[in-house]
Structure formats: C-alpha cells, structure tokens
Amino acid sequence: MVHERQPIICDLARPTVLSNPLSMSVPASSPISQSSASATARSALRLPIRALPDALISQIAAGEVVERPASVVKELLENAIDAGATRVDIKLDGGGARRIVVADDGCGIAGDEMPLALARHATSKIASLADLERVATLGFRGEALASIASVARVTLTSRTRDAAHALRLIVSDVDEASASHSPMPASGGIGTVVEVADLYYATPARRKFLKSEQTELGHCIEAFRRAALARPDIAFTLSHNGRVVEHLNAASPIERVMQVLGNEFASAHRPLAWHGGSDGNALAFTGFVGLPSASRASASAQYFYVNGRCVRDKLLNHAVRSAYRDVLHGERHAVYALALELDPAMVDVNVHPSKIEVRFRESRGIHQFVFHGVSDALARSAEQAVSAEHAVAFNRSASNSPPSPDAAWFPTGTVSYAIAQPLAAYGRLFSDGSRAFSSVDALAVFERAQTASGTHTPLEEPRLDESGLDESGLGQALAQLHGIYILAQNARGLVLVDMHAAHERILYERLKNSLDAGVVPVQSLLIPVTLRADSREVGTVEESSEVLRSLGFDIAVLSPTTLVVRALPALLAGNDDAGDIETLTRNVLRDLESFGASRVLTEHRNELLGTMACHRAVRANRRLTLDEMNALLRQMEATERADQCNHGRPTWTQWSITDLDKLFMRGR
C-alpha cells in the first residue's frame, strides 16, 4: 500500500510559533507536551490583577500556620497558657486529623468577643507597634484561630468568671470564618474549649500530604511536651482515641523535666543557673543539661525556651553545641532543657510564621552568655551538681522575677556585665569568675613534670568522717583492678575509676589552660629521638614550625627523610620511650596536615590537644602505687569536666553501700 504525502496547510492568519527542537520527538499526548502547551497558553494570556476573596486569603495563611495537626495543638496550647490556665486537657482522634479538643480553665472569652476571636488579625495581646516590639505572650498575631477555622470545622465554647453560663460558637463553613455570629448558650465551666474537626476538609489536597496516624500523633505528643516543659506549674493531659497517652500533674521544674526526658536523663544531668546583665538588661539562663552518657542518636530531645517560648534557633543551638565540643564527639546529640529570660525588647519573635525562630538584638553577647553558662554547668563535678539540684528554677515565677543562684554553688555570686561587650571582655569576665586552678604538678610522682610556675602546692587534705572515710570527693584508693581501674572508697561506698580516661581528661584540661595562658612549659629530652619521615611529614614540620613551638614541641628536619624531636610539652614528658614519642609526633603532624597550620589553634585546637592527651595518658596494665592512685583522684577532683573523658565517656562511677547491700541481698 502506498501512502500519499498530505500537503502541509498553513493558516497565514494565525502566527506560527516555533517550538523547541528538543520537544519535536515528544508525542502530543504526553504529559510533557501538555504541560508545555499549557505554559505557552498561560504566557500568552494576561490575567487582570484582582483582590482575593477573604476565604482564600485565610486558606493561604493557614498553609503557613497550620502545617499539620501538631500545629493546631501548638497554637491552641499557647492560647490556653496565655489565658492563665492551671489545667489543660487535649483529646485527639485519628492522630488529630479527625478531631482535636483542647480544654483549659483559663480566663475565658466574653460572649461579645467570641466572633472576633475567629476573625483574622483580632487579638487581645497587642494593640500598637510598641506592644509588638515587647511581646510578652506566646500568641500575638491574632491569626491562629482564623487560619484553623478556614480549613476545619471549629466549635468554640467559653465562659468567663463573671458569666452566668457558657456560650458556644460553631463555624462549619469556610465563608463563615470571618462572618459575624451570635453565640448560643451552652453548658461548661470557667475557661475555654476549642474543638477542631475534619482538619483540611475545605482543602482536600492538603489532607493528602498528612502522614500516617501514628506519625501525626508523634508530632502532636512533641508539641504537647514542649508546652509541658515550659510550664511545669500547669497540669497537662493528652488522650488519643479515648485512651490517655500522657498525664502530667503540676510539679517542680526538676520533676517535670524528668517526667518528659526520662530516667536516663535523671541519672546523668547537671542543673544550670547563670545570671548576668545590668538592671535594664537582666539575663537569666536556667535549666538542665545532660551529660554525654545521656546523649542520643538524634536531636529530638533538645528543648530551648526564650521567655517561655520553645524555639529552634541556629545561634542558640550553635552556642550549646560549642559548649559540648569538649565532652561530646562523633554523631551523638546532647539532651537538654534550657530557658533564657531577657527583656522582650531585646528579642524579636515575629520573624517566622510558626514563631519557632527568634532574632536577638545583641546576638554575639547572647551566644557567649549561653556558651559560658552551659560550659560552666558541664564543668562542675557531680558533688556540686547534687548540692544545687533543687535550687534551680526552670520557668518564670508568677512575678516574672528571675531566679537567684544558689550561693554555695556559685562562690563568686551573680555575674554582671553588659551584653554588648566584645568577646575579649567576656573572656576576661568569665575567667575572673571561675575557680582558681593550681598550676602545680599534683601528679609529680605520676608524670614527673612541672607546670609553668615550677612550684608545688600540697593537695588539700580530705575531710574524714568518724570512721576515717572521705566525706566528699572520690575517696581513698584501695587497689588497682586488671591494670585498668582504680578501686576507692568514700563515706558513701565504692568508687570505680577508669584511670586512662581520667588521666586523659586531666592532661587535656591542663594543656588547654597552658595554651590559653600563652605559656606551655617545655621538657628537653635527654636523648633526642630521630624518626624516618616522608615528604609530607617533613613539609608539615617546615610549614608549621611556629605552631609546633607554641605547643611545646621542638622538632627539626635533619635530612629530607629524617626528623629529630628534641623537646616535648612538659605535661606530656616523663616517658622517654622512643616508640611512644614517635607515635605522638606522627599523630600531631597528621592533625596539623589535616586541619592546616592556620586553623589548628583556632577551629581545631581541641581535636589536636585531645590527640596529644590521649597518647600520653597512662596506659592500661601500668601498675600504680597507692600514692599515685590517690594523686590521680585528687587531681580529678580539681579538674573541670573530670566526670567525662574527651570522647564523652564517664571516667568514674559510684556504688553506695545500699546498692552493694542489694547486690548481696543483705538485710532481707
């Protein structure tokens, strides 16, 4: 069969549009071709500018405010807290997609104000620009209820204290959200009940993006916990499909934190109470930070509050993460619940649709304030933490006055400074307020090295009870177990110490202090150590000679393939084994090559010092005398962060007499 070619007919009255040559092979019925055609049609048409309907405006706004059921729970919980509630009950069905009910016993809403409560940009919390610049409540925009009502069926029931009965307002249509309604009489106690049913029924496309019921429930529980942590003085109950999931009675801050963060955090945390600023710019930083042993694989258990508002701010997260860098390494994430109180005029909370991000007027000062507060809490020993446990106030009191620190926990008293000071001023200020560390080589028999001062100060005599046991601290050494652990006893019971991890932390902190002071004592080797080196190691020595000298190393190039080590930092001396010195030197040069000489003393200083301390700490199977073991225990008591090694592992643990009795069932 022969097919005749059909003639090409051109419509000269209609302009010809040349298509992309790459699209000529695409069939006309394909989605790509259809989308290209529709795009061409849209570009050819010019739609007139017109005002959007109010209902559509509300639905667009709801896309930012109501991301998922958890967003509704968050907004309603914030309204309940702002209303002065002492009890809040949340009921969910279908992970919150079918129904959300939040009931509180707050001040309630007057009947004539209930229609306004569902209108856009209607609020009782601010009235002027000056109020917006000093927001002291969780909610202030007046768009949460209106946004929710535009995408769901909302029933609002409320009663004030002076009202004879409750009133109920039902909004079941999108166009009714901004209309005027007359509330109907209803039964109900003082407070407000908001019921949100059929979330996204008005925007079915958004409903398709919701996850499974359990996933949405998990997000709702997280919003519930954030609110519960912020206000431990309020009782919270969460139910799902008729079953109580979580119930939290009003409690003290420490009790509420332990209820939310669990038993593991309860046994491995430090309280924090850090205060500063002038009378006009007072700062209060309180809460609880978890030890590295309580760290987790994700950042899901990190709670930070600014003036009672839970935020996830990059500046604050970086400050806390920087404070943990000495004790937490790898992919682990710290656990903490922290609250920062400051003048509302010093922070802008109106920078994100969900109000979860903030902007500080003096961001550098806030960063340093938070960093030093967390660092101080992590540096304190377990003994100091126990004495201060119940002195920490986590939330704002009724008078909004910041909590005062415990005098026994803060021997230097309250820190005062202006938050606009430069970073150098912060360093001087906090170094003045920290505990004085002896520059003595307390482990002279253990390390055979002197520190910068070259003097020796005797260790403080332990306080003994009637039985002759140490009342505080790590006690007195008894023996060494398998050349790895030190057994000691104090008044409470048995202490077990990992000697390598403990000594590593001691060396690390002392290296940091020496480097910060600008004086690293040097120990010349009686017999210099030579080692064969490749071209990269030789080049690193030549390029990083100044850095090596500042660290206390005297390393020279003898030939293109040979290096000689003439001196080491005094803190790392005491062992003339050539193999150990060679290993230490190669690891230091490796770090210098990896990090770069220009950055190794700034961004990567701690990693380098950690390498140095780890390789010169006492090794396993080294037999110590009782005097050496006791010297190590005393130095641990005088060293910051001695409870954890450089990698976040605990350095010691305590068993009380009661714990030991339980092991052997004594008294039963």
Image: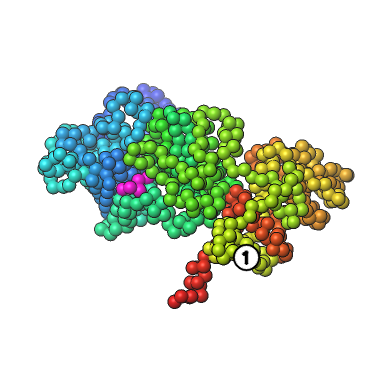
- Mark 1 = which residue? 487
| Coordinates of residue 631 in the picture (x, y in percent) | 68, 57
**Residue situated furthest bottom in the rendering:** 668
Residue nearest the observer in this picture, 297 or 39: 297
> Where does the magenta region start and end?
230-234
Colouring of the image: rainbow
Task: Please name the predominant secondary structure of the magenta segment in the image.
Answer: loop
Q: Residue furthest right?
A: 559
Image x and y of residue 399, in percent: 34, 38
Q: Is residue 56 left or right of residue 39?
A: left
Pick whichever, 325 or 86, lies toward us: 86
The residue that appears at 76% across and 53% down in the rendered structure is 448
The image shows a total of numbered marks equal to 1
Q: Quadrant of the C terminus?
A: bottom left
At x 50%, y 55%, the residue is 268
Looking at the image, residue 384 lies above or below residue 40: below
Q: Residues within 10 Å of mark 1 (few under 14, many from 20)?
A: some
Which residue is most to the front?
Answer: 466
- Relative horizontal placement of residue 475, taking residue 575 as reference (left or right): left
Q: Could you say which quadrant of the image residue 575 lies in? A: bottom right
Q: Is residue 370 visible?
A: no
Is residue 232 magenta-colored? yes
Camera sees residue 365: yes
Residue visible at 14% across and 40% down?
163
Could you tell whether 501 is left or right of 471 in the image?
Answer: right
Q: Residue at x 17, y 47 (%)?
A: 189
Q: Residue 271 appears at what percent x and percent y?
A: 47, 49
